[in-house]
Amino acid sequence: MSDEWIDQGAFFQNQEDHIKAVECFDRALQKEPSNANAWHKKGISLGKLGKYEEAIDAFDKAVQIDPYNADFWRDRGAAQNNLGKNDEALESSDKAIAIAPNNSRTWIVRGFALHNLGRYEDAIASYARAIEINPFGADGRRAWNNRGAALDNMRRHDEAIESYDEAILIDPFDIYAWNNKGVALSALGRHEEALRCFDKAIEIQPTYATAWKNKAIGLRALGRNSEAIEALDKARELGLQ
């Protein structure tokens, strides 16, 4: 039966083996081509593999079969965001919200689309809604972090720092929040504080090339040029162009 292949595919998804997961969902779909759940799960694994066009095709099949499932629309929107199809992602997330208005992840997907469209105030409002629904956990952390990025783009760096601090309170090991906080501090000329943030990100993940690059920029701003060169060399060694 198709359910057995779906269960096996879900097991491989949990193990982050998305190639095998896709194979299992394909087996399920051979038996039951109209199984919306299998199409949806296949789309998720294809997205994890970076195959966003194929993921969207799978989500399209899912929403054609069951157009009233908010998760299908939300994940379609996330894949569209990853391809820069932000107008389409906004439409998908709005459809998901019309079905299930209290899903924090959907508001984050919507906020990301708005952010990429340069509609920062609207993006901040979407992230605020996500935070209102779920201020903690992974969704809360992502919403606070993304809210900070939108505020940074509006040069509201003090408010952005407050958002990054909220993300760090939820997860003190969030390298992106530490790095982003450092960037906001640098924009305010607070380079010593920024360096401490970049160093914290690097302490958590020594291979985080972006933090090494930003550390180099901060060191240069403080006139510590030899250290800046070493940090930039490290960023390049880690693959940063």
Image (cartoon, helix red, strand yellow):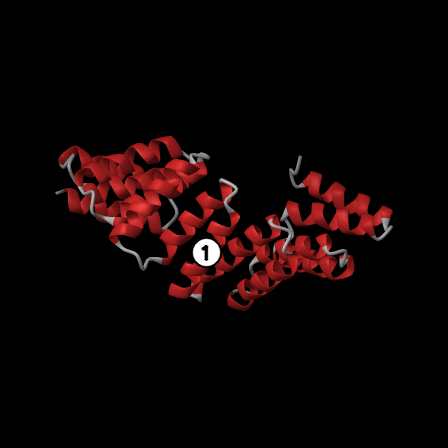
Q: Residue 206 location, x and y as percent?
A: 65, 52
Q: Residues within 10 Å of mark 1 (few under 14, many from 20)?
A: some
User: Measuring 44% from the left and 34% from the top, which residue is drawn there?
Assistant: 83
Left or right of 232 in this view: 131: left
User: Measuring 29% from the left and 40% from the top, which residue is drawn there?
Assistant: 42
Q: Residue 115 location, x and y as percent?
A: 50, 45
Q: Residue 230 location, x and y as percent?
A: 79, 45
User: Measuring 31% from the left and 51% from the top, which residue is drawn there?
Assistant: 97
The image quarter containing residue 105 is bottom left
Q: 1 or 95: nearer the eye?
A: 95
The C terminus lies in quadrant? top right
The N terminus lies in quadrant? top left
Tag 1: amino acid: Ala
- How many numbered marks appear? 1
Mark yes or no: residue 49 visible: no
Residue located beneath label 1 in the image: 125
Q: 34 or 101: nearer the eye?
A: 101
Q: Residue 15 location, x and y as percent?
A: 37, 50
Q: Dot 1: what SS?
A: helix
Left or right of 30 in this view: 108: right
Left or right of 185 in this view: 118: left
Up/down of 90 relative to 129, above or below: above
Q: 207 or 220: nearer the eye?
A: 220
Mark yes or no: residue 183 visible: yes
Q: 154 or 186: nearer the eye?
A: 154
Left or right of 2 in this view: 137: right
